[in-house]
Amino acid sequence: MGRRQRGELTPLAERVKLVELIREAHHSGARLDKACEVASVSKRTYRRWYSAGKVQADRRATAVRPEPANKLTKHERQQVLDVCNESRFASLPPSQIVPTLLDEGVYIASESTYYRVLKANEQVNHRGRSRHITARSKPEAYQAKGPNEIWSWDITYCASVIKGQFYYLYMFEDIYSRKIVGYEVHERECGELAAQLMQRNMLREQCFNQPLVLHSDNGAPMKCLTIKAKLEELGVTASLSRPSVSNDNPYSESLFRTLKYRPQWPSKGFNSLTETREWVDDFITWYNDEHKHSKLNFVSPGKRHAMQDKDILSNRKIVLEAAQERNPMRWPNGIRNCEPIGAVMLNPDSVPDEETEKAA
């Protein structure tokens, strides 16, 4: 008879049979521990099974266990379900829902509790159209300690309803705040259009006459003489990915991933250039002002760019501390991290260990 797995219940009839065999062997002269070993039962288990002259049934199945003092009430569990099923949160994971509610002064439960309640109600499904994130290799390193120090840009295709026809979205992102600082949609890829947009971005952000790094991949518009001449004229340092390594431009790639996996993304294509521009306008407004970015401790890029993240996270901390005071037993590990994100590295894997320690 094989040894049972830890925690597995042994039926009473099987216990009785094993105890009879062990007692019979023991009365015939065998040592008790050896008899138990042959029956794949420890001597301690045998003594627990056989006491007061009879075989005891397993009481674990009928044991009354007190509920944890910090367990959610039925009303609170229903609150979690109701919030997750609201139309505005239907395509968002708990990691986006909880910070949004905190900014509204509402706290119901932690993200892990949300997942646990959703799983118990068979509602744990992948929300949105995103896929698994792949690892990214990095080229030369730069560090951004504030807005408008390092930008990343790229061009992506927006398919039209006509097969083979595309609209081209030019997008510039500040890697410190993740804010989209400039964008345009055109019917062609062109370095001249990108150079003009870059100049308008700097004018809008008022970041002339200060160090700025512009990172991109090795696409043709990024390497053309027009964009190179414009960057030299503006005093901008150009940073390029390694040839044939698309993941060397992770910030722009990540942004385009968010763009194209929005639930509202027209998977069948855009009807016109005007429709494409209107859709992108709505996306930019959502992304910069409403989206709680996971890499910014769930603060919107626009607030981070305006250096307001410290105040927002401080207010969240007050809400969490009040919730902790109301029910301390639910916070054995303390409240969540409410510290603003510090400096941001572009391609940190290429920084030597000694330089990384100094930067930290």
Image (cartoon, rainbow, N blue to C red):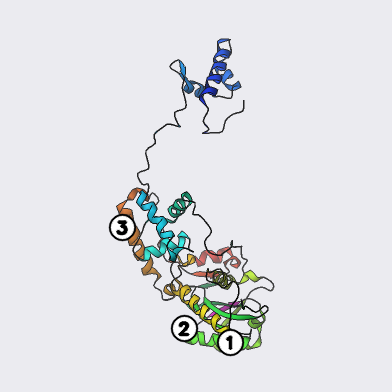
Can residue 286 be spotted in the picture?
yes
User: Could you tell me the amino acid type at mark 1?
Assistant: Ala
Q: Which residue is mark 1?
A: 195
With 89 as the anchor, is 14 left or right in this view?
right
Q: Amino acid at mark 2?
A: Glu
Q: Earlier in the sequence, mark 2 or mark 3?
A: 2
Q: Which residue is mark 2?
A: 205
Identity of the residue drawn at 46% across and 17% down? 54
Position in image of residue 252 (x %, y %): 57, 73
The image shows residue 261, relative to residue 11, as above or below, that is below
Residue under the point 31% across and 57% down: 322
Q: Nearer the viewer, residue 141 or 257?
A: 257
Dots 3 and 1: beta carbons under 8 Å? no
Residue 82: image x %, image y %?
A: 40, 58
Q: Which residue is mark 3?
A: 322
Q: Quadrant of the image for the N terminus?
A: top right
Crowding near pointer 2: few (<14 within 10 Å), some, many (20+)?
A: few
On the image, which quarter does residue 256 sit in? bottom right
Instruction: Answer with left or right where residue 356 lies relative to residue 335.
Output: right
Give the amino acid type for the residue marked by disc 3 in the picture.
Ala
Residue at x-position 63% and y-position 88%: 226
**Does 101 appear in magenta?**
no
What SS does tag 3 mark? helix
**If you read the primary sequence from the N terminus, does the residue marked by circle 3 or circle 1 appear first?**
1
Task: Please identify the residue farthest to the top as the structure is shown.
Answer: 28
CA gap between label 3 and label 1 equals 51 Å
Residue toward you, 236 or 303: 303
Q: Position of residue 350 (x, y in %)?
A: 61, 67
Magenta-highlighted residues = 210-217
